[in-house]
Amino acid sequence: MKLIDGKKIASEIKQEIAVQVNEIVERGERPPHLAAVLVGHDGGSETYVAFKIKDCGEVGFKSSLIRFEDNVTEDELLAKVNELNNDDNLDGFIVQLPLPKHISEQKIIEAINPKKDVDGFHPENVGRMVIGLPSFVSATPFGIVELLKRYNIETSGKNCVIVGRSNIVGRPLSVLMSQKAVNATVTVAHSRTHNLEEVCRNADILIAAIGVPEFVKGNMVKEGAVVIDVGTTRVKSDKTKSGWKLKGDVLFEEVADKCSYITPVPGGVGPMTRVSLLLNTMLSAKKEIYK
């Protein structure tokens, strides 16, 4: 069994991005600029956005954080999105999810200019991705494919089972894994899939993205499989100072010995999700998606 070190690969990609930023600045151009809109004070969102701002500083990007309280109206948030859409000094921005219940997340996503949608959630970017046109791809699927590529894991002709069908991970990832650049044969499974254990045991590459801690057990994984754990659920723990720990969707202790490769939690997919946002912002700054 070999651990797939997402933190290490993300660090290497950051170094590559930093070199590109230096080249841009040396030409007398401004560095890429990423903004994040944060509504309320959700602990997970606060932490995630703080990491994104830190990542920007490490590669030389300019970053902006725009805060709103939980009681912001949908119209006020839409007005800010429109302002950011029209800011020529901004290459991309994200509106951190989840949003308060009185705001339609889909309405906000659709209001974002696809050319600045570095989260890759806008229907135009999703549609372009599905038919193989250049697009901003949502960060977690982008990061997973990059991990497989950089570890030289054979994907062509392999059976890939994705457990989870979310619009952010499972569905877009199923498209990416089936495209010619990857060439896997993909099955999308979920909690209602009949004979789920058997379906998972047929996977050469098993990707767990169902959002249930330790859902994938040892009896669901065949010998030599590659296992990618997308899960990051906070659970209470009396063994840590913070009182909680992150658990993945895979029961690591049962599965690890059966795998050829496996991602840990934390330190696997998470760092790649963050660095993929930087990659999308760089693509936007270089006008490589929308000419």
Image (cartoon, grey):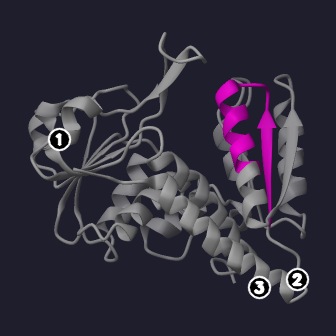
Which type of secondary structure does the marked residue at label 3 adopt? helix
Q: Amino acid at mark 3?
A: Glu
Q: Is residue 176 magenta?
A: no
Can you identify the residue that label 2 sits on?
Answer: 29
Task: Determine contact: label 3, label 1, CB under 8 Å.
Answer: no
> Start and end of the magenta stretch?
33-53
Q: Residues within 10 Å of mark 1 (few under 14, many from 20)?
A: some
Outermost residue toward the top in this view: 238
Q: Identify the residue at image location x=63%, y=58%.
A: 277
Q: Position of residue 257 (x, y in %)?
A: 17, 41
**139 and 117: which is toward the camera:** 139
Can you identify the residue that label 1 sits on?
Answer: 257
Placement of 160 over or under 194, stated as above or below: below
**237 and 173: which is toward the camera:** 237
Between disc 2 and disc 3, whose residue precedes? 3
Residue 199 left/right relative to 210: left
Task: Determine contact: label 2, label 3, CB under 8 Å.
Answer: no
Q: Identify the residue at image location x=86%, y=54%.
A: 82
